[in-house]
Amino acid sequence: MNKEIKKDLELRRLEAKDLTQFNDILRYAFQVTDEQLLKVGWKHDEIKRSKFPILEKAEVIGWFEDGRLAAQIAVYPLQVNISGSIYQMGYITGVATYPEYMGLGLMSGLMKKSLETMYERKQCISFLFPYSHPLYRYKGWEVVSDKMTFHIRDHQLPRDIDVPGRVKRVKENSPDLIALHDTFARQTHGCLIRNQLVWEEYWRWDVEDVTVAIYYGTDDRPLGYLVYLIENDIFRVKEMIYLNQEARKGLWGYIAAHESMINEVVGSNYNNHTVSFLFGDSDMKETIRPYIMARIVDFEGFIGQYHFANTDLNETITFDIVDPVLDWNNRSFTISFAKGKAPVLVDLPSENRIKLEIGILTCMLLGYKRPTYLQQIERIEASKKTVTLLETIIANEKVYFSDYI
């Protein structure tokens, strides 16, 4: 019976005429009510119109039955910094299926089609925020970053911070804010390069009382910013970034200046370092949870841009990749390193071999888990020499990814 239903379905790209159905399936799948929309300042029907740019700028495809949308997936064409190289990236979002169409393999088809489109468009890596880790792992994605939350009592905030610059509150569309994030992103591994579409999503669900504050150095150069909300005696940090330690200290000094207004500071950080270590009183609550997943879409294209930590060696290494979805990755690749030359792919196999799944390969090359650890937990097959080589050529750095799209 299920196969008969699927025969009657049409796979196509969503168009402007499908805006209402696009909005309806998202609200159904994520249980967004009118009451919730009104609470954060949205008027009736505004959310639907606000989603129109996605249909224009993103690749949104879906299955239809007699013109009625049954399942969909959206891919934002974005850019991400990986070890100093700016990659074209496909960010998957808007994944939704009506319950009566579950079990037909519709989402598998949409994922495969989306990955094929990314490949054609030279988007050699894909990111997403998972609603199901097992599902996306099965399709080749793997966790590559964490979200860490902190709870700081008012009496634990730093005091008497002396910095040469100052903090100014600015508007949400401040050019300094946008330029500052762009500078930060282009020097931070794993950070998303925010275009206009991303900034629109960044502010989409925020209430009007969100405030932006920027730390300026003595030369009036923006060096860090803070996006926050104060409610119910809690200072809620949406995002804090800084280009140097002076800006970090200045922003925490600014937060501490609110001590008489608040009982607690709550927020998140994405650099995989605990906030508590920075404070004299480190007895505070911090939690960690897996955040963003990624998968290499085109290994050959990915390696062509990848910055290895060490290329000053004469070695070869063969990656035996297992990719259950994409045939062009599901094979062996050998990379040759020669002193004074850029690494290149060659046809000859190497005695240094590593066998692993595409998702594990992704999280290893992005620095989320080290080769030695992955061998210990039996997620890679490789000799001790090969693992030592991998430890040498892969940078020891963590992904910073703070956006939820």
Image (spheres, rainbow, N blue to C red):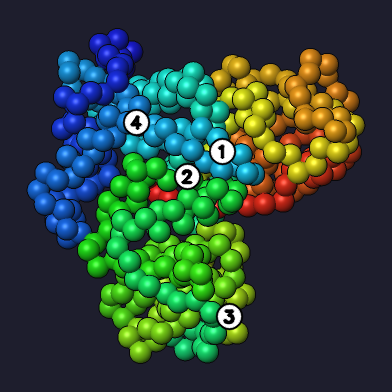
- Label 1 packing within 10 angstroms: few (<14), some (14-19), many (20+): some
Specify whether 71 is left or right of 289. left
**Residue identifier under label 1:** 86
Mark 3 in CB contact with mark 2 (< 8 angstroms): no
- Label 2 packing within 10 angstroms: few (<14), some (14-19), many (20+): some
Q: Quadrant of the N terminus?
A: top left
Specify whether 207 is left or right of 196. left
In this rendered view, identify the residue nearer to me: 303 or 183.
183
Residue 365 in picture, x, y percent from top left: 67, 40
Determine if residue 45 is in view: yes
- Res 27 quadrant in image: top left
Amino acid carrying mark 2 in the image: Ile
Rounded to the nearest angstrom, the CA distance separating label 1 from label 2 is: 8 Å
- Above-or-below relation of 362 to 282: above
Which tag is nearer the camera, tag 1 or tag 4?
Answer: 1
- Can you tell which mark lies on residue 279? 3
**Residue identifier under label 4:** 58
Mark 1 in CB contact with mark 2 (< 8 angstroms): yes
- Res 375 quadrant in image: top right
Query: Regarding mark 1 in the picture, which secondary structure is present there?
Result: strand
Amino acid carrying mark 3 in the image: Phe
What residue is drawn where x is 72% and y is 51%? Answer: 396
Rounded to the nearest angstrom, the CA distance separating label 2 from label 4 is: 16 Å
Specify whether 361 is left or right of 160. right
**Residue identifier under label 2:** 193
Amino acid carrying mark 4 in the image: Ala
Rounded to the nearest angstrom, the CA distance separating label 1 from label 4 is: 19 Å
Query: Regarding mark 2 in the picture, which secondary structure is present there?
Result: strand
In this rendered view, identify the residue nearer to me: 125 or 320.
125
Mark 1 in CB contact with mark 4 (< 8 angstroms): no
Mark 2 in CB contact with mark 4 (< 8 angstroms): no
